[in-house]
Amino acid sequence: MPKPVDILFTPFESGNLSVPNRIVMAPMTRSFSPGHVPNDDVVAYYRRRAEAGVGLILSEGVSPNATTATGTPNVPNIVFDEAKAGWGKVADAVTAAGGKMGLQIWHEGPFRNPAKTEHPEVPSWSASGFKMPDKTLWEPMNEAEIETAITEFVDAIVSAKELGFYCAEIHGAHSYLIDSFFWDKTNLRDDRWGGAWEGRTRMAVEIISRARAAVGADFPILIRLSQWKQQDFKALAAATPAELEKWLTPLAEAGVDAFHCSQRRFWEPTFEVGIEGVGGDAHLNFAGWAKKITGKPSISVGSVGLSGEFTAIYGPDGTSEPASLDGLVDRMQAGEFDLIAVGRALLQDAEWAEKIRTGRNDELMTFTKDALAALN
C-alpha cells in the first residue's frame, strides 16, 4: 500500500510565501508562443493545471529581452506589448481557477544559439565568453552589458507583479546567463563580477536587491539554482557545505524568499560522506541543504513520480512509468524541504495532482516524449 500523501496537500506559509499545498509545477520550456507571444493555447494549458489543484505554477522560461536572451524559437518574452497582454491573460486565468502562479525569468546566455534567432549578428552573453569550460566563443560581458542584463531582469520581475502574477522566479541554474557567473569553471573574471563567491554572486544579488526594492516586501521572489551543469551533470558548483553557504547567504540577504533547487533525482544527497562539514546531514539533498543553511523555504525537484530521470526523453522510446512517492512523503514529513516541483508528470497529465490527492493511482499516465510536442 502506498503511504498517505496528506503532507503533499497541506498548506504552506512562511514569510510572504503562502500556497494551498506543497505541489509546484516546475518550469518547463514549451516553445508554443509564435512570435514570442503566449496565445490562448498557452492560457488554457496553465489554467488546466490550476483547475486540477496544483498549489503553485511556475511558468516556462520567459525572456527579459528580445535579442541576447532568446535562442529558442517560439519561446515567449515579456518585452513586447502583445506578449505582456498574453501573460496577463495567463495570470488572470490561473487566478480565476483558484491557482497561484509565478513567472520565471530566463536569459539563455551562453546557451543561446544566435543562428536560430532573429538577431544572428548579436553575440551571446556570458560571464567570460564560455559555453563550455576553456572554450571561448565570445567576448566576456562588459560593464554596460552586465548593467543592461540586471535592469532587464528587474523590469521583467516588475512586469510580472503588474500583470497579476503571484510571484516571480529568477532562473539562475543550468549554465544559463546567471549561472555562468556562479560557476568558477565559466567565470574567470578578475573584476568585481568574478573571483571568489562574493564576486560570482554579485550579479544575482544586484538583480534580487533591486527587484525587491521595486516590487516591495510582499511580492515573493524565488531563485532556481543547480549544482549540475548542462556541460557536466556531475558538477558541484559548491563542493562543500561551507562553499554552499558562501553561495546562498548573499542571495538570501538580498531578499530571496525561497530557493528552488534543481537536481536530476531528488532523492540523491548533494554531498558525499567524508566531505568536511557534512557529518550527520549526509542524507540531505540540495533543497535540504539550502533550507538548513539559510532558513529560507526550499523547493526540491527531480524525477518526481516517474521511473526515469529527464534524460530518458533522449532514450529509444523516451518513456518513464509512474513511480512510488513514498520516499518523497518521508522526506517532506521530516521537514527536509518544504515544496516539491513536478515536471514531466504534470506535462503529461494536467490532472496528476488531483489523481494523487484522491488516490487514483491506477489512472496515472506513462510519460512519453510525445508530451513535449503538444500543450496537453
Image (cartoon, grey):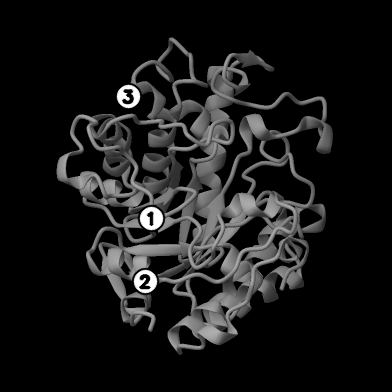
Query: In whole angstroms, how far apart are the C-alphas of marks 3 and 2?
Result: 39 Å
165 relative to 3, above or below: above
340 relative to 177, above or below: below
Residue 59 position, x and y percent, is 58, 60
Return the residue found at the far top: 190
- Say what amino acid the circle numbered 1 marks: Trp
- Say what amino acid the circle numbered 3 marks: Glu
Return the residue found at the far left: 280
Q: Say which of 314 and 200 sits in front.
A: 314
Q: Which type of secondary structure does the marked residue at label 2 adopt? A: helix
- Say what amino acid the circle numbered 2 marks: Asp
Callout 3–callout 1 Cβ contact below 8 Å: no
Q: Residues within 10 Å of mark 1 (few under 14, many from 20)?
A: some
Residue at point 21%, 49% (across, down): 292
Which residue position is annotated with label 1? 267
Q: Earlier in the sequence, mark 1 or mark 2?
A: 1
Q: Say which of 220 and 259 sits in front.
A: 259
Q: Which type of secondary structure does the marked residue at label 1 adopt? A: loop
Which residue position is annotated with label 2? 326
Which residue position is annotated with label 3? 198
Q: Earlier in the sequence, mark 3 or mark 1?
A: 3
Of labels 3 and 2, the one closer to you: 2
Query: In whole angstroms, how far apart are the C-alphas of marks 3 and 1?
Result: 30 Å
Residue at point 55%, 86% (across, down): 362
Q: Which type of secondary structure does the marked residue at label 3 adopt? A: helix
Q: Earlier in the sequence, mark 3 or mark 2?
A: 3
Residue 141 position, x and y percent, is 58, 20
